[in-house]
Amino acid sequence: MGSDQNHELTEIFQEIQVINKVPEEKIVLTGISIDSRKVEKGNLYLAIPGTRVDGHAYIEAAVKNGAAAVAGSAPSLRYRNLPVPYLQIENSREGLAHLTAAWYGYPARKLIVIGVTGTDGKTTTVNLIRQILLAAGFQTGLISTVNAVIGDQTLDTGFHVTTPEALDVQRYLARMVEAGITHVVLEATSHGLAQKRVAVCEFDMGVVTNITHEHLDFHGDYQGYLDAKAELFRLISVSKKKSAPHTKLAVLNKDDGSYPSLKKVVGDTGVKRIDYGITSPADYQAKNIQPDPAGLRFTVERAGQKVEFQTSLIGDYNVSNCLAALALCIEGLGIDWQNAVEGIKNLSGIPGRMEYLNLGQGFSAIVDFAHTPNALKRVLIAAREITPKRLIVVFGSAGLRDKGKRRLMAEVSAELADISILTAEDPRTESLDGILQEMADGVISKGGIEEQGFWRIPDRGEAIRFALQLAKPEDVVMVCGKGHEQSMCFGETEYPWDDRTAMLAALTEYLEMDGPDMPYLPTQDQ
């Protein structure tokens, strides 16, 4: 990483504790790197212990490539013979956040920073908040797992879903400050929180959408997962004071099982708490939810006040996302109700979230990102509301990830869909047949009969084609799990893949029209 100007070593270590000693001699750095192969002359190389490799093992290579200094969490005595200074810090990942924030002049201290965390609904809620802020006249940036939005510029943030690395987050924040942005909405994943990627984002307020079964392979168990999410509220409690008017605020979902635990966490931090709900009495509560030709209408009640809202989004779960967004904007920033109404109405949709593809085929074709048991359940319930006919769903479950959800997702589909088609979804180095067998066992446990109520089709493109062949007028065909993502991993190779392109390819074949080619996956060769 580099920037327009260099920095002295002592300058960027001012707010981070060094266990040995910061060298007194003047050392000018040209950038920060966490990859020894990408180190350039004059860089600081930061060694980070990873899940597969330890950056400390590459310190000598980094020095050989021109590193002017090295930092890491390993004991300094081990590197006393290095030709450049070695600075021992307590936590390399947290150190990365501090060092990159210092490099860019702590940009988050010049912004009002809003964090959104949860299992499902984060990206939608981030975008809803941004639309409300824009309607209220705030210059607002966004960093999500889909993209970063800085003024009129939209930047892709990567292949798969997680918060960008601290290097990128701080760079985006710095660019926002330069662009005159005053507020930023940041999607904070559990990985991003646990791995300290957002440790120096100086959050001022935050929302949790829900906390359900996901990423237990990484966090160990549900409590570990919940603790990672709760870190957002601890970060709010210790953030620096800002000049712009706002209230330090935690917005919690009273309908969610995480609420009692998070309520206690927030209480311990001293941050103001507001809750929202549909089924539970809450500070912000939605009632009279009605399907509308353009989406949904609903009423929000707050302290005796009732306000009507309209959204083009569908599904009660999106009403919950709307509640989270407007509660934060009204309570945390003092935005008026009319701007909240306008902002929510202005959001037309999110890429890969209940995204319709209509070429005149006579049935609904939808792509959605749902890749957890709870998310799949919610989108299937929403899909039931838009058709009196059959619901056909195509989905898989990722390799080398939370294995417990495979059977759970299959059971949800068996209960709510008429036809389930099990297929590939980032199998990585696991056996795809083995993953599909685990999922098939889940469907069978709910009474599913293979090649009647469910099928196993390893190639995702072929699975989508098959779903379309089964479809009849007014049916709904949903492809779930990838949404906006742009690749699929087989072995250790990322193959270009977009479910929307694949669905369009299958639809145009079905309708005998010109259209895109079906993207290639190695399962096509089997």
Image: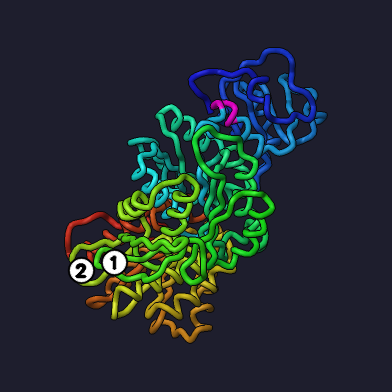
At 65% from the left edge and 28% from the top edge, which residue is drawn?
61
- Residue in front for this viewpoint, 244 or 132: 244
Looking at the image, residue 415 sits to the left or right of residue 8; the answer is left
At 39% from the left edge and 36% from the top edge, which residue is drawn?
139
Q: What span is in magenta?
A: 100-105
Residue 451 lies in the magenta-colored region: no
At 31% from the left edge and 61% from the top edge, which residue is drawn?
310
Between the C-alphas of marks 1 and 2, the distance is: 9 Å
Quadrant of the rendered structure where residue 215 is? bottom right
User: Which mark, by number, is residue 391?
Assistant: none
Three-letter amino acid code at disc 1? Ala
**Label 2 sits on residue:** 361
* Position of residue 249 measured from the top left corner of the image (x, y, whole percent): 55, 49
Determine contact: label 1, label 2, CB under 8 Å: yes
Looking at the image, residue 230 sits to the left or right of residue 334; the answer is right
**Label 1 sits on residue:** 365
Three-letter amino acid code at disc 2? Gln
| Vertical position of residue 489 compared to residue 364: above or below | above
Tell me the crowding category of disc 2: few under 14, some 14 to 19, or many 20 or more residues within 10 angstroms, Cα based: some
Helix or strand or loop: what does disc 2 sit on? loop
